[in-house]
Image: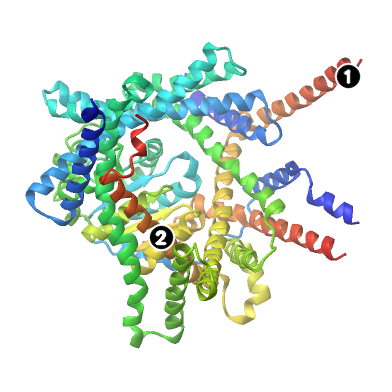
Amino acid sequence: MKENLLKFLKIDRRWIFLALAMILFVPIIKPIGLPNKTISKDVQNAFNYLDKVPAGSFVLFSLDYDPSTRPELHPQAVAALRYAFKKNLRVGIVTYIAGSTGLIQQLIEKVPAEAGKVNGTDYVVYPYMANAVAAMTQMASDFYGIYDKDIDGRDARSLPVMKGVRNYKDIPLIVNITGTSILDFWVAYVGDKYNVPVVGGVTAISQPGYGPYLQTGQLKGLIGGMKGAAEFESLVKEPGKGTSGIDALNLAHLMVLLLILTSNIILLVVRYL
Amino acid sequence: MKIIKNYLPLAMVMVMGLLMLGSYYVPHKLSVDYVEQMNKWENIVFAFAFLLGLLSLFVSHYGKIRRRQDGWGYSIFVFVGFLIMVVPSLISGGKQMVDGQVTGLGWSFRYVYNALSATMFAVLAFYIVSTAYRSFRIKSAQAFVLFVAAFILILGKVPLGQMAWESVLGWTGYGIDRVIEWIMSVPAVAGKRGIMIGIAIGAIVTSLKIIFGIERQYMGKD
Amino acid sequence: MTETTWLIAGAWVSAGLTIFLFSFLYKDNPFFKIAEHLYLGAGMGWWFQVYLYNIWKPKVFEPLAGGDFFVLIPALLGLSLVTQFVPKISWISRYGFTFMMGYGAGLEIPARLSTDFMSQIAGTIKPFSLMASMSGFDILNALIVAAGTICVLFYFFFSVEHKGSVKKISNIGIYFLMIYFGAAFGNTVMARFSLLYGRFDDLNTSAAASNFYATQIILAAMAAYFLLHSFLGKKEQAEEAR
């Protein structure tokens, strides 16, 4: 008995791999139908901040995630951008992660067209910049000192979308979606220093780390991981990959808990048997 | 020579650092102009730092190929991968889409780089599960507290877990989402804030050491 | 090639590379190694062309061609970094590094001081000034945050002499850290699964009939490879034994 239990504890881990693969793949083919229902305070706040920006304002989106965190962050970016367009906000997109330029391209191929938005008039995409802090500090005095041209090489100052925008005083909200610490930079170098509201979208891994900034109001709202994406999607009433993702994760989450409990119970039984 | 090799760089870091630091508190036009110039320069200098990574990867794999080291054939694929991205980019001038058509570069990103990069990190999901099974041991009170927090978070993030909580603890009137919210906004904030203040003090001290030339490891050996 | 052909080719390439990388979970194999090395190269290649077309060309070459020789200063500072690879003149790279270090350190001090230090202390104290309008539960929470933060700081800063009451306080600090780490672990599980879901979702797309069942065929081929490999491996072993 004891030996069998211990053997079970040392099971070839490839069986666990296989179980996880099955438990995650099957709901993709055949959805369980248990989508996310709750909305957390931080996501609601993020939504509210975007919601109350007056139509026609220029909102800066800093999209800093690459394929390695795409499943969590791309749905957030899609949902937030869709809502910004729905609210008729002008959108500027910047990035400080080289890998995100490809994802931004995929984003703007799809989302603006759905809302009938025009490049240069309603939105603009700026080239990648190597040093986030340098670009952020620069935008405080003169936006065009660092972003003189957009990705298509057009003169940024003369684009209709940039009308009346010179520095942070003309930007009522910054939305930063990132899998890196760039959100910390936005909070420290821009939000705190120039009093610009910053809303974040981050991976579930880094989400708990932003608790202190949220409590102090240094960060106005936070979308965390795929759950956050699903919540935001339901707030803007556009179910997407976040919503279907949460549905697929249901069983896998229970599996982890079951595994941790099983192994610990086995150890207890072995010790006291 | 020592002046050029040592003193001048150290003087530079001190002047740069003190001026950047001072400009934070002095909102004069001169300091703004200075900071603007430095921002533009820093962005360019920083971009060249990328070459360090690129060259060290190339040097190491070129060396493997030249010495016919074990598995040198794989090293060729480093260069193949590099060219798969760079050649289409040179053809389309860095554009991923031209006249509504996805270019070779756009294609390479979507189907090569995206698949490789995303899968590299997705593999970790398997390891976290097997680690959870094999090494998550609740042996002490501290480990138990960690487990309880993790348990609630894992359970409450998915609808199925929320339903399970409702059926067992629904009578308390507290949904698991509210418990999670409390954990994240009260005890977890305390834990993280302690870490944050600690790191901030450490970072400030390190920065001061760098500015005053006490910390100079980044300069390498003489 | 038409657009559809490109899409189908994409589905095959993406499914193939994904499965090659996953195959490591079963066993190390040449297909995994090829994909792994491709990843290193492709990542560098992507970054290289981003830097080329977003920074080096518009921010260095074009201004230079237009007669703005000021950009030579940061360009040379940047290029100086590369001397790292030549031991004899590697000291030149110090100029590039000191520039970046000075810039970063000078900016970091005030930002950290205000954002991560003073604002955090203020954020811990501030709730108590609003006590009159707070519910009992909120007051309790504010007390927990304040006490917890102090305990954690005790744990960090008096790490040398953990004795008596200091030890008790820093022990409580550990519990707060454990709750934070537990929450972080719980969230990490969700994050990792989300990434895996993303890959599986892509594989599912490649598995469609319109993509000629790329996923299924490549998966079957991989399985056949492993079967054949283990079969041949056993035969070899048997021959060696003879």
Q: Please identify, in this view, whether the residue under mark 1 or under mark 2 is nearer the observer.
A: 2
Q: In this orientation, does residue A124 appear?
A: no
Indicate which disc residue C215 carries. Answer: none
Indicate which disc residue B198 carries. Answer: 2
Query: Tag 1: Cα neighbours inside 10 Å, few (<14), some, or many (≥20)?
Result: few
User: Looking at the image, which residue is at 34% across and 30% down?
Assistant: C50
Chain under disc 2:
B
Residue B30 appears left or right of A199: left
Query: Tag 2: Cα neighbours inside 10 Å, few (<14), some, or many (≥20)?
Result: some
Q: Amino acid at mark 1?
A: Ala
Q: Position of residue B183 (x, y in %)?
A: 51, 69
Quarter of the figure that contains the N terminus of chain A: bottom right
User: Looking at the image, which residue is at 32% across and 54% down?
Assistant: B204
Q: In this orientation, does residue A57 appear?
A: yes
Q: Position of residue B191 (x, y in %)?
A: 48, 65
Chain under disc 1:
C
Secondary structure of the residue carrying numbered label 2: helix
User: Looking at the image, which residue is at 16% across and 51% down?
Assistant: B23
Residue C172 sits in which quadrant? bottom right
Q: Amino acid at mark 2?
A: Gly
Q: Are marks 1 and 2 on the same chain?
A: no
Residue C47 sits in which quadrant? top left
Q: Is residue C20 above or below residue A254?
A: above
Indicate which disc residue C238 carries. Answer: 1
- Give A207 or A157, whichever is nearer the viewer: A207
Q: Is residue C204 above or below residue C194?
A: above
- Give A83 or A178, whichever is nearer the viewer: A178
